[in-house]
Image (cartoon, helix red, strand yellow):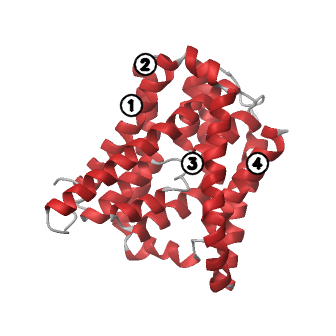
Amino acid sequence: MITEILLPLALAFIMFAMGLTLRPGDFALVFTRPKAMALGLLAQMVGLPAVAVAVIWLFRLPPDFAVGLLILAACPGGITSNLLTHLAGGATALAVSLTAITSVAGAVSVPFLVNLALVQVGGQGGTTDLPVARMTIGVFAIATLPLIVAMIVNAKAPQGAARLEKLARPVATALFALIVAGAFVSQWRVMWEHAADVLPPALAVNAGALAVAWGIGRLGRLERRERLAVILEAGLQNGALGIFIAATLLASPAMMVPSIVYALVMNVTALAIIAWVRIGRKEKGGVSPAFPE
């Protein structure tokens, strides 16, 4: 009942709450800041999965954990990424736009990458046994559709959406924490027995994603606020969606372990980045250095 009903409903509400902060105009950044958007999408949708593949090869992860890590890497940005970007002094509009695009595109990109992982890493030799249609429909219905509906509500009634968002965001954040905590408790024994197998790779993927995003932003000569937004978007994933895919769509508790661990790791590193930026801002007399040149 939990994974089949409560988890999908909670995730749908989280995505709806996220959508209340988005407007169709957020996609205009694709045209007004095309380089920043392109580099952000490159870091999020190409760089992160590439890092995950490299980590899987380096650590020789068991198939279930390897697929679970790739599921997490395929997911779009998390619900807290925009808020943490704002707190860090990053380009919030860019972060919001990246979240919107990756979340909408996730209806196609996530099932594609996950099924590719099942075939190439999970040891399933053919696509006939894979839940391609079910996964595509599930991701769209639970993650993408609520986001689109909320965006329409925001476009039609922005004042009402703003009031609703003030109530929905803390509930959504609490639901995200409950999903991660509940999954953590349910898989405590597996994580305890395989801590050495999962924690170092999760840390490596997170650190690698942050480093790749920083490198892309640096080479692309993004201004510091944009670079910070790209870094946080690449490092903060929608762990709740990863748990939903593994537990509900694939019925594999082992595959959701990497999403649980990563959800804990990513928030620690994100808070460390924010602390670093704020300390640097104070030392510079209120001018945020974001990240070193």
Q: Residue at x 59, y 57 (%)?
A: 103
Q: Quadrant of the N terminus?
A: top right
CA–CA distance between discs 4 and 2?
A: 32 Å
Q: Nearer the viewer, residue 121 or 147?
A: 147
Q: Quadrant of the C terminus?
A: bottom left
Residue at mark 4: 8
Packing grade of label 3 (10 A; few <14, some 14-19, many >=20) is many
- Residue 240 against residue 104 in the figure, above or below: above
Snapshot quadrant of residue 19: bottom right
Residue at mark 2: 59
Residue at mark 1: 204
38 displayed left or right of 293:
right
Numbered disc in front, either 4 or 2 = 4
Snapshot quadrant of residue 287: bottom left
Q: Amino acid at mark 3?
A: Asn
Decide which of tag 2 and tag 3 comes sooner along the chain. Answer: 2
Residue at mark 3: 238
CA–CA distance between discs 2 and 3?
A: 23 Å
Packing grade of label 4 (10 A; few <14, some 14-19, many >=20) is many
Decide which of tag 4 and tag 2 comes sooner along the chain. Answer: 4
Q: Amino acid at mark 2?
A: Phe
Q: Are marks 3 and 1 in contact (CB under 8 Å)?
A: no
Decide which of tag 4 and tag 1 comes sooner along the chain. Answer: 4
- Residue 82 against residue 55 in the figure, above or below: below
